[in-house]
Amino acid sequence: MPVIDQFTLKDKVALVTGAARNLGREIALSLAEAGADVALTGRSMPEMEKTAEEIRKIGRKALAIAMDVTSLPQIEKAVQKIVSEFGRIDILVNNAATRSHKPLLEISEAEWRSVIDTNLTGAFLCCRAVGPIMVRQGGGRIINISSRAGIRGRANVAAYCASKGGLNQLTQALAVEWAPYNILVNAVAPGIINTDRSYKGATAIPTIPKERVAAIPLKRAAELAEILPLVLYFASGACSYTTGQVVLIDGGCSAQ
């Protein structure tokens, strides 16, 4: 098979969490452009329905489902609906995330738990719900959207750093545990990304300080489109011997 053909996702079914906006939306669209049918989950149905319609216009099936990744009943109900609609789930992208941008001494217990429950426990619950399906199918791909903050600590986002660090370890542990089932588990860990920061959710952080951008060797933040190729690789047949990896996309910061 030509190398380029190994990147096709034709007739695969993908589930993307946190797909209403920003990176989640772009991941859903890119998977569809590569040939996959896509289930989009999140809390904003109007935005997900709009993206689902865009996917249908390029000739792929799409399903938008309201789902909170901290609720196991909602996850199980959504997974059942996806399997009923599409017959299988080949790709899971754990993208849903939130953060609390405060000094540790100002973070409430509720805020701490919200970040951990969404970013780490939410990924665990989704893996737990989708895993048995992939086992029965004889394999699958799980892609966790992590962050450079899960590898290098940063002030005022302790809960976020802890959640993403845990997600990295979950990635590696599941890669080992589920390798016998041909389920490959990897993580994409971006640095700073240009996103819609007006949204009070996964991207509710202050404007990026100029000194942080200046510290990046490439002297700029990443664009959303620059994260997508690695996600597509991990989702595709080209990724047949790569598992348990946490790959940074940070403009060279990790090389310093």
Image: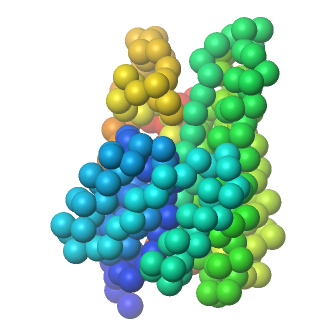
Question: Which colour style is shown?
Answer: rainbow
Q: Is residue 10 above or below residue 70?
A: below
Query: Is residue 171 shown to the viewer in this render?
Result: no
Closest to the observer, 241 or 146: 146
Closest to the observer, 140 or 53: 53
The answer to whether residue 225 is left or right of residue 70 is: left
The location of residue 163, given as percent across then percent down, is 71, 37
Closest to the observer, 47 or 202: 47
The residue positioned 62% from the left and 56% from the top of the image is 74
The location of residue 162, given as percent across then percent down, is 74, 33
Q: How many marks?
A: 0
The residue positioned 33% from the left and 46% from the top of the image is 46
The location of residue 63, given as percent across then percent down, is 39, 65
Query: Is residue 207 shown to the viewer in this render?
Result: yes
Q: Is residue 14 above or below residue 153?
A: below
The location of residue 161, given as percent across then percent down, is 69, 30
Closest to the observer, 123 or 248: 123
Q: Looking at this view, name the residue that lies furthest to the left.
A: 57
Quadrant (top left/top right/bottom left/bottom right) for the N terminus: bottom left
The residue positioned 65% from the left and 41% from the top of the image is 118
The answer to whether residue 16 is left or right of residue 255 is: left
The residue positioned 35% from the left and 67% from the top of the image is 62
Q: Residue 57: which quarter of the image?
A: bottom left
Quadrant (top left/top right/bottom left/bottom right) for the C terminus: top right
